[in-house]
Structure formats: C-alpha cells, structure tokens
C-alpha cells in the first residue's frame, strides 16, 4: 500500500513505499527458482506460448515459416534479402557470451513509467543478473530510482539514444524493427556508416551509433507475433493496428525465454491520473499514452495484472494494479 507523501520544501522528497523487502533484494543471499517464470507462463497459456522461439534473428530465419510469412513488424516477408545483407556484417547473433545460460538467472525489466520516480530501488535493480532497459530512458541522474546496470537495451530507430556519449560499451543494443526503412537504417549503422537523412521516420533518429557490431542484435519478430497472438490480438495479414505489444511487454516476453525469474519495475499506467508524469525522466503527461494508434494500453494493462497475479512477474515498484 502506498503512503501519501507531502513535499518537504526544506529538502528532497522521501522515497515512496514499495512492496518488497529492500534489504533482501539488495543482499547476496537471494534464492533463484530454475525456470519459474517460464513454467508459470506455460501453465497459464499452454501451447499459445512458444518458449522455443530464438531471441534474435540469425541466418536460419529463412527456415522458420513464422519469420517470413508476414510483413514487418510481425515478420520479414519481402525483406529477406535485406536481413541477409545485414547479418553478413553482424559477427554475433546469439545470446552474449558473458551471460551464463547454465546458471539460474534473475532478470528485471526496468520500465519507463513515472511510477519509478522516488522508489529508491536502484540498488535492487543493480543486484539482478540481467537488466533490460527500454528505448532512450536514461540512467544518469536517476540511479537511485532505476539503477545504473544495463545488460540489454531495446529500441526502435526513433526511440534510440541520439547522442554518442550515451552509448557506453557495457550493454547489447537489441534493435526492434517496425517498417522497411528501419532495415536501411540498421544496415547503414551496422556497417559503420552515417545516415544522410532522417526522412521517413516519425521522429529524429541517431544518424550513427558508436557501438561495435558485436554489440548489436535484431529482435526476433516471431516473439512479437507470438505475444500478439497470445494476448488475443487480431493480426489482419500483418497490418499494424492497435495490436502491437509495447516495448515493455516484448522485453518481458524476451526475459521469460532467457531468464528463470522475471521482475519488473516502473510499470503501470493510471487512467485516473491523466496529468501525472508518463515517464520518470520527463514531464510528458499520462494522457499521451492513451492516444497510441499501435498499442492497446487498456488491454495490455489487464494482461500485466494477470501476469502479476499468477506470479509470472514480480512487480518491484507496485504500479501494476
């Protein structure tokens, strides 16, 4: 239960109450249950959840019908040659070598929601084995709330960092694709070249990315398709309508396939507070998310609540309700 906090004009606001034992989650004595989140999701959805889908696109994608049956963003139909050209310049397409897949992995998806503000669970986030972050959400200046550790950062071209200094070498860039132009961007970037123009994108993009090619991965659109179907969305021959799971949901579904226990933080939209901050790092109001033409936020909110109730995810900041 969240305490009401009044502003203290003489100093910083106190941290918000969160539904976890901070001392335990910051300690080195945390237990890990092998395959727990994945097993819980399979119990809930059965065959509707395919746990064997590869996390990233590799040269074998042409042999998987679901990868090429539909156009982007659900597949790569009519874009097979472009993907193969990109893969020629990617030395790594598997899970990074420094992730011990034979160990029990505890993973957290740090969401971008305003609910993360003043949670003061940064040390908890840093204590997870793997940390997923989304889009261009910063850590600098927000370490007390969201931590600083990053293993994977998932973003579309339009939602990626634009400043070179934001690309530190400690994390893998998982590029998500929505449209054919995104393939042009990725091939240009992966070959160490600079885009001449950002025309055709819905907002400004990074014209170059100062990361080595070994730190890039292509998010497998089969996971997007599997997640959309599992959530009951109608795909309509691959048309992108209000049937695209959010980046946060896709990160959860990637984490469940890779990790044994999955937690989330910074998740939760409150429709009764349209003027509340949408993100922990800016002042964009909550009402903006309801205008999305690709995401059904109301439906996804219910799915996340179900995930929490069934123990598939642990909600560290208490925003899913």
Image (cartoon, helix red, strand yellow):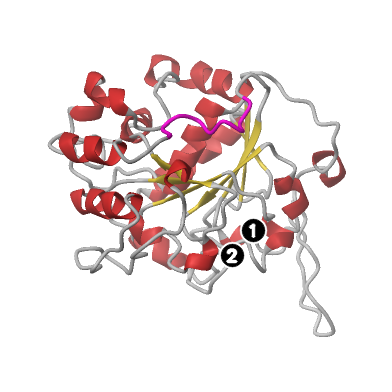
Q: Is residue 28 magenta?
A: no
Query: Residue drawn 53% across and 74% down?
Result: 283
User: Which comes before the other along the chain, label 2 or label 1?
Assistant: 1
What label does residue 280 carry, if any? 2
**Is residue 319 visible in this depiction of the protein?**
yes
Magenta range: 92-100
Question: Are there few (<14), some (14-19), or many (20+) residues within 10 Å of tag 1?
Answer: many
Q: Main secondary structure of the magenta part?
A: loop
Q: Please give left or right for residue 5 compared with residue 134 in the image.
A: right
Q: Please give left or right for residue 288 compared with residue 131 in the image.
A: left
What label does residue 116 carry, if any? 1
What percent of the width, then of the height, locates residue 98?
A: 61, 33
**Is residue 273 visible in this depiction of the protein?**
no
Q: Hey, which quadrant is residue 11 in on the image?
A: bottom right
Q: Nearer the viewer, residue 231 or 90?
A: 90
What percent of the width, then of the height, locates residue 45?
A: 45, 20
SS type, badge 2? loop
What label does residue 189 carry, if any? none
How many callouts does the rendering have?
Answer: 2
Q: Hey, which quadrant is residue 200 in on the image?
A: bottom left
What percent of the width, then of the height, locates residue 172?
A: 51, 45
SS type, badge 1? helix
What percent of the width, then of the height, locates residue 31?
A: 79, 26
Circles 2 and 1: CB distance less than 8 Å?
yes
Indicate whether 231 appears above or below 270.
above
Indicate whether 186 appears above or below 275.
above
Query: Residue drawn 66% across and 18% down?
Result: 34
Q: Is residue 95 magenta?
A: yes
Separation of residues labelled 2 and 1 (CA atoms) = 6 Å
Query: Residue drawn 66% across and 63% down?
Result: 117
Q: Nearer the viewer, residue 205 or 191?
A: 191
């Amino acid at each position: 239960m969240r305490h009401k906090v009044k502003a203290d004009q003489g100093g910083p606001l106190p941290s918000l109450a969160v539904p976890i034992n901070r001392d335990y989650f910051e300690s080195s004595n945390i237990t890990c249950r092998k395959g727990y989140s994945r097993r819980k999701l399979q119990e809930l959805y059965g065959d509707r959840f395919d746990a064997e889908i590869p996390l990233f696109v590799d040269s074998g994608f042409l042999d998987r019908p679901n990868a090429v049956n539909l156009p982007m963003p659900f597949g790569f139909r009519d874009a097979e040659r472009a993907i193969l050209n990109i893969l020629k310049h990617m030395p790594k397409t598997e899970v990074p070598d420094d992730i011990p897949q034979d160990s029990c992995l505890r993973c957290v998806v740090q969401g971008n929601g305003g609910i993360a503000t003043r949670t003061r669970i940064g040390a908890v986030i840093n204590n997870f084995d793997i940390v997923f972050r989304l889009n261009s959400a910063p850590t600098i200046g927000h370490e007390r709330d969201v931590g600083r550790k990053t293993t994977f950062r998932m973003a579309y071209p339009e939602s990626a960092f634009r400043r070179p200094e934001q690309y530190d070498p400690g994390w893998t860039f998982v590029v998500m694709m929505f449209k054919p132009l995104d393939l042009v961007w990725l091939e240009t970037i992966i070959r160490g070249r600079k885009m001449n123009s950002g025309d055709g994108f819905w907002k400004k993009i990074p014209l170059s990315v100062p990361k080595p090619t070994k730190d890039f991965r292509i998010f497998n659109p089969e996971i997007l398709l599997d997640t959309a179907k599992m959530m009951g969305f109608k795909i309509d021959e691959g048309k992108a309508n209000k049937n695209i799971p959010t980046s946060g949901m896709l990160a959860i579904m990637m984490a469940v396939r890779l990790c044994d226990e999955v937690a989330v933080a910074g998740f939760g939209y409150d429709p009764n507070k349209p003027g509340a901050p949408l993100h922990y790092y800016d002042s964009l109001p909550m009402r903006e998310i309801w205008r999305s033409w690709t995401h059904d936020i109301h439906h996804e909110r219910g799915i996340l609540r179900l995930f929490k109730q069934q123990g598939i995810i642990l909600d560290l900041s208490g925003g899913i309700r």
